[in-house]
Image (cartoon, coloured by chain):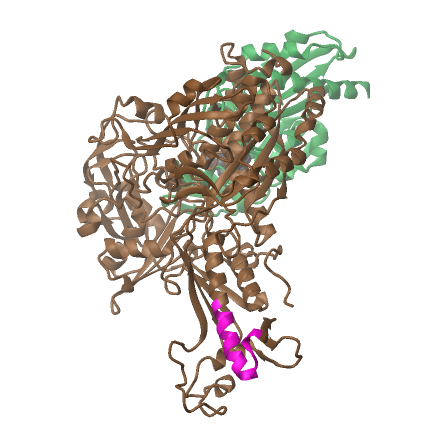
Chain colours: A brown, B green
């Protein structure tokens, strides 16, 4: 039998290329292209009174300058509201170039094209834009107070009111033995992939066709958007995602202004044009996520069981809503996590601010939801004097309750029905893995070293692999090479390895024969994109189905050649053979040749497929009705609804009670993503997610001042954690297969980041005895909290004996 | 994030470098480029000419004598960090450079460049001050020694004229019966410090504290040296109350707030780091006094 590849820690096939500098990222392409640069708004909110380009005109090497006045047709209209929703009652989007008003620092106003990026920036620097400043709204509280408005015609700053309820919450709260109410905050961070966005466009005037490379997570949809906005026929546009140096969500948004403007300029100029985003541009003109104010009321009984939960979230969506209200819906629906919540009501008000737009960043609303729910569990435990793990255990959905219907509607419009899971199993494993029950000994040891130690945990359930579909194409060439293609893109997650593992396993070929292509509309035109932990679930199952189709055809053809019963055949190591009859076999590559009847014998292999190669059956056409030449198959996977992965994290922190430095000394993860295709890649995803979780909890934030200026728009001041700040992560797996898809898998891409903020907040609270109601938290803020005599103290503080 | 146009000069001698600088008031020296190039890329600086001194001979030596350590303009942080002889004469050099950035940056960035850059968040500006050091400055007009007090004018601002090349920095030797320590707190390992402290403790022959000086990083606009002696003067080294010195230090500094730390938090750290570094420095001073 072929070595079983599904489930094996196969080494990433893309790494040799990527880590030896042979990757081809956007800026590695188009060496001779013209370069674009942008004049961006320096103001958070202003009217654009005048654009004076005079001084730029004599810059040598300048090729073109475009302002809003130069846009026409659909390009002069607002950018699309990509994901409309009935509750998004006041959607607003910007224009490719500002049309009269700018709503955040960084919004593009003028595009400059020149012989290279240096010259383009020289010219951009000389363009004088006159602004009239308008009142600025920064932060969710200011938006809520609505003393100033972001959009003139949205006077309460509310873009959307999203509301779901599973019962009558008010009577349920009134009847609850205990209730608790509190308000908490979570701040903005961002995806900050190491490679920013980038676009390269080439117009072929003779052919009337456009080729665009974009560092995107959704090449098929970028293609459709470009065709629509530039009024081209879809068949004249191709979009390719080259190697992409990280996405984490920001590159799923499209079309970015630059994705339209760069092709527009290429067409108008008849020259190749490229734009590669720089770091500052990325900070001020891409997307951020996570700021929310959460007002929570919970009812619970003496055992700590939740009887009713009422949540009001104020969600900062930034200046525009191109990606609809996906993030707040995800918060609203994933908040309930692994728990039975008998009556739940959630209202989310999504509000405009004069800041960079908010769109999904790995986790996409889930870290906030998890923070709300898990901190609620901690508060209940605290109020009742119970162990935090016990309170959670009492509230968990049990394995016999699946499929479990929360009676909520997910971001894809489908019901939130958990397909499978074992949450008590996760919790038990976590308690053992982190040594939860030995916390007192750890605490004593730390105290002896002059440190405060705290432990915290957080559980989550994550809807992964939403539809509508993905497709896969598998083709066996006469050389024996197996080509796999899917339209979904890759940002370095390991798709080349994982899809190859799946196809090699399904088809029975050596993995070295398999070559994977992703995100290229020339190869595969139908796709949705890489987001929501969906690649393995969606394209993984699609390529598996496609491989099964190829296998079936191969066996059918081989059965004729070998004069055997198809049921008696198997494929192993690229050989179709009769089970148990050594020697009775035909190589898959020969089957591929035979699958395509030929007239011309252009090489030795082809000779076998010509009409004179063997005895033919004169009574049948060479290609049977309903059949097709070639050994290939295309198939699609379209799920009924998302599959729900789950996990539990615990953090152990040590705090220096003199400097208030916070150190995560131990981090434990128990992870369930159904059947694991490649445990090494899943662990890598978890590690990366934890790094971003720690970043979001302790280091990263978008430091806007009251004028809407981002004060830390560089990697010097935006504190993405280094390897030195990321704790060692210990991982335990649990595999609860999904009954929804053929491979039984669930998504794993985002999970690692989700519980970080909640678990670390809990641990800090445990260590210090002070309520942590705003995250992230830095040492300087912890110091302020600790010396503030009025700050609320938790019950635990009496035990930890923290200095006042 | 691309620099504005500039001319580039690649002189092969100090004279040539000084000539180019003298001819062009918009010229700037380029050493390791670890501070200057980011400023150029962000167009926060746009010198007309960059005078790259990396190929000027004779500027890359560390000279160690009993009086102190003379560090040439092209000596990289990494080179100083590894220099055992320099560390013996003035232990603060290695202790402080270990806190400068990350290895890749230490391999390119020069110690003299970081002093010429005059960043109050830089370690080596404070070390120059704490050790009572000076720099040797050359211009077309000649050569002079400028003491640290006369060098630092403000954040990223020195008293040097645009046409000057600092050829070396001199760090006096650690006095007898003295010990030093250096510590800092940064948000991430290798970042500029939120607060750092370098200290020197000197004992008398009876192992009583006779002098205590400290200088802080990322506290104040220019490097300063604070005399903390009065808090512990005359106390036996083993029983001196370093916390009292820390408390005194807190009253002497005037830190600013920024997005990473409030002024109050920096003041807190000044106290804690002073106390901690003084204890270490006193231990070293005691060893050196016993020996
Ligand atoms: C990510 C990062 C982190 C860093 N972290 C730290 C840190 O923690 N602590 C720290 O101290 N530094 C840090 N640095 C800065 C680093 O130490 C620089 O090397 C140093 O500040 C400047 O030295 P340089 O040789 O690179 O000078 P350059 O960047 O070449 O020049 C800096 C300035 O000094 C002038 N100059 C340089 N040499 C001379 C000379 N011989 N005569 C006259 N003028 C001269 C230049 O004209 C310029 O104005 C960091 C840098 C980076 C990129």
Residue at 70 percent across and 16 percent down: it is B202
Magenta residue check for B5 = no
x, y (%) of residue B148?
Answer: 55, 23
The quadrant of the image that shows the C terminus of chain A is: top right
* Residue A653 in view of the camera: yes
Residue at 54 percent across and 83 percent down: it is A561
Q: Main secondary structure of the magenta part?
A: helix
x, y (%) of residue A284?
Answer: 36, 37
Magenta residue check for A555 = yes
x, y (%) of residue A628?
Answer: 40, 76
Relative to residue A618, is residue B227 depicted above or below?
above
Q: How many marks?
A: 0
Q: Nearer the viewer, residue A584 or A282?
A: A584
Q: Is residue B82 left or right of residue A307?
A: right
x, y (%) of residue B184?
Answer: 60, 25
* Residue B25 in view of the camera: no
Q: Is residue A606 left or right of residue A34?
A: right
Q: Quadrant of residue A632?
A: bottom left
Q: Nearer the viewer, residue B9 or A521?
A: A521
Q: Nearer the viewer, residue A790 or B223?
A: A790
Q: Which residues are magenta?
A: A549-567
Extreme residue toward the right, this view: B291
Q: Quadrant of residue A428?
A: top right
Q: Is residue A486 left or right of residue A389?
A: left
The quadrant of the image that shows the N terminus of chain A is: bottom right
Q: Nearer the viewer, residue B30 or A672?
A: A672
């Amino acid at each position: 039998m072929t070595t079983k590849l599904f489930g094996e820690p196969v080494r990433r096939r893309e790494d040799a290329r990527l880590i030896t500098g042979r990757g081809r990222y956007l800026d590695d392409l188009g060496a001779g292209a013209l370069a674009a640069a942008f004049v961006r708004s320096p103001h958070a909110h202003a009217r654009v009174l005048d654009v004076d380009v005079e001084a730029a005109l004599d810059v040598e090497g300048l090729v073109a300058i475009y302002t809003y006045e130069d846009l026409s047709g659909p390009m002069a209209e607002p950018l699309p509201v990509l994901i409309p929703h009935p509750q998004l009652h006041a959607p607003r989007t910007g224009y490719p170039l500002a049309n009269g008003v700018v709503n955040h620092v960084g919004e593009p106003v003028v595009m400059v094209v020149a012989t290279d990026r240096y010259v383009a920036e020289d010219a951009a620097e000389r363009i004088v834009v006159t602004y009239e400043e308008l009142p600025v709204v920064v932060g969710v509280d200011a938006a809520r107070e609505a003393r100033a408005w972001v959009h003139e015609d949205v006077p309460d700053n509310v873009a959307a009111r999203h509301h779901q309820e599973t019962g009558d919450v008010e009577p349920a709260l009134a009847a609850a033995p205990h209730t608790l109410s509190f308000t908490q905050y979570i701040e903005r961070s961002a995806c900050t992939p190491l490679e920013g966005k980038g676009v390269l466009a080439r117009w072929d005037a003779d052919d009337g066709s456009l080729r665009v490379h974009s560092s995107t997570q959704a090449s098929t949809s970028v293609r459709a958007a470009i065709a629509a906005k530039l009024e081209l026929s879809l068949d004249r546009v191709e979009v390719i995602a080259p190697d992409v140096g990280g996405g984490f969500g920001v590159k799923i948004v499209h079309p970015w202004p630059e994705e339209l403007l760069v092709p527009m300029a290429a067409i108008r100029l008849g020259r190749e044009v490229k734009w590669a985003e720089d770091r500052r541009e990325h900070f001020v003109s891409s997307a951020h996520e996570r700021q929310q104010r959460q007002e929570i009321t919970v009812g619970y009984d003496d055992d700590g069981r939740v009887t009713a939960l009422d949540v009001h979230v104020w969600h900062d969506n930034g200046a525009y809503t191109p990606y609809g209200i996906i993030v707040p819906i995800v918060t609203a629906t994933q908040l309930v996590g692994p728990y039975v919540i008998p009556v739940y009501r959630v209202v989310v008000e999504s509000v405009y601010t004069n800041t960079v737009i908010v769109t999904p960043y790995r986790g996409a609303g889930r870290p906030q939801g998890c923070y709300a729910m898990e901190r609620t569990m901690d508060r209940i435990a605290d109020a009742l004097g119970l162990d935090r793990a016990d309170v959670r255990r009492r509230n968990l959905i049990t394995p016999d309750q699946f499929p479990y219907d929360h009676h909520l509607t997910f971001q894809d419009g489908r019901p939130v029905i958990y397909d499978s899971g074992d949450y008590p199993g996760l919790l038990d494993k976590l308690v053992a893995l982190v040594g939860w029950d030995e916390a007192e000994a750890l605490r004593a040891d730390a105290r002896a070293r002059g440190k405060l130690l705290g432990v915290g945990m957080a559980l989550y359930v994550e809807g992964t692999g939403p539809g509508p579909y993905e497709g896969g194409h598998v083709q066996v060439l006469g050389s024996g090479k197996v080509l796999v293609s899917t339209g979904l893109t890759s940002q370095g997650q390991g798709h080349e390895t994982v899809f190859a593992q799946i196809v090699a396993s399904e088809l029975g070929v050596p993995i070295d024969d398999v070559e994977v292509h992703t995100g290229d509309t020339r190869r595969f035109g139908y796709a949705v994109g890489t987001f929501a932990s969906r690649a393995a679930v969606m394209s993984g199952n699609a390529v598996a189905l496609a491989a099964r189709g190829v296998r079936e055809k191969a066996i059918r053809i081989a059965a004729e050649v070998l004069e055997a019963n198809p049921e008696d055949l198997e494929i192993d190591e690229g050989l179709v053979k009769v089970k148990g009859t050594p020697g009775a076999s035909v190589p898959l590559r020969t089957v591929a040749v035979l699958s395509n009847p030929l007239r011309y014998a252009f090489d030795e292999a082809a000779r076998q497929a010509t009409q004179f190669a063997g005895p033919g059956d004169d009574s049948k056409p060479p290609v049977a009705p309903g059949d097709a030449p070639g050994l290939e198959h295309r198939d699609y996977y379209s799920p009924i609804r998302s599959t729900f992965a789950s996990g539990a994290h615990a953090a152990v922190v040590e705090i220096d009670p003199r400097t208030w430095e916070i150190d995560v000394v131990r981090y434990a993860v128990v992870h369930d993503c159904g059947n694991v295709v490649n445990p090494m890649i899943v662990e890598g995803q978890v590690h990366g997610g934890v790094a971003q979780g720690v970043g979001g909890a302790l280091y990263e934030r978008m430091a806007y001042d009251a004028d809407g200026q981002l004060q830390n728009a560089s990697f010097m001041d935006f504190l993405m954690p280094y390897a030195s700040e990321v704790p060692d992560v210990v991982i335990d797996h649990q595999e609860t297969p999904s009954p929804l898809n053929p491979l039984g898998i669930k998504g794993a891409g985002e999970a690692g980041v989700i519980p970080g903020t909640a678990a670390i907040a809990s641990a800090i609270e445990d260590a210090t005895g002070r309520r942590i109601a705003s995250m992230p938290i830095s040492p300087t803020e912890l110091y302020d909290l600790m010396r503030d005599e009025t700050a609320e103290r938790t019950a635990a503080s009496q035990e930890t004996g923290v200095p006042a | 994030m691309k620099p504005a146009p500039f001319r580039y000069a690649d002189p092969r001698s100090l004279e040539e470098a000084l000539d180019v600088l003298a001819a062009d008031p918009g010229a700037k020296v380029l050493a390791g480029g670890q501070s200057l190039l980011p400023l150029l890329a962000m167009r926060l600086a746009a010198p007309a000419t960059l005078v790259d001194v990396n190929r000027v001979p004779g500027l890359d030596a560390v000279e160690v004598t009993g009086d102190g350590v003379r560090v040439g303009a092209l000596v990289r942080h990494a080179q100083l960090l590894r220099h055992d002889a320099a560390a013996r004469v003035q232990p603060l050099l290695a202790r402080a450079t270990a806190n400068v950035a990350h290895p890749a940056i230490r391999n390119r960035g020069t110690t003299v460049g970081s002093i010429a850059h005059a960043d109050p968040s830089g370690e080596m500006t404070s070390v120059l001050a704490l050790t009572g050091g000076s720099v040797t400055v050359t211009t077309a007009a000649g050569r002079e020694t400028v003491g640290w007090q006369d060098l630092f004018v403000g954040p990223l601002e020195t008293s040097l004229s645009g046409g000057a090349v600092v050829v070396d920095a001199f760090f006096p030797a650690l006095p007898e019966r003295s010990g030093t320590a250096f510590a800092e707190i940064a948000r991430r390992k290798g970042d500029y410090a939120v607060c750092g402290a370098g200290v020197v403790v000197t004992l008398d022959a009876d192992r009583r504290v006779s002098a205590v000086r400290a200088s802080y990083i990322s506290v104040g606009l220019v490097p300063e040296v604070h005399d903390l002696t009065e808090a512990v003067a005359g106390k036996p080294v083993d029983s001196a109350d370093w916390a009292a010195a820390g408390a005194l230090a807190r009253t002497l500094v005037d830190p600013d707030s920024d997005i990473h730390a409030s002024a109050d938090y920096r003041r807190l750290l000044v106290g804690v780091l002073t106390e901690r570094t003084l204890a270490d420095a006193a231990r070293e001073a005691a060893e050196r006094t016993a020996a």
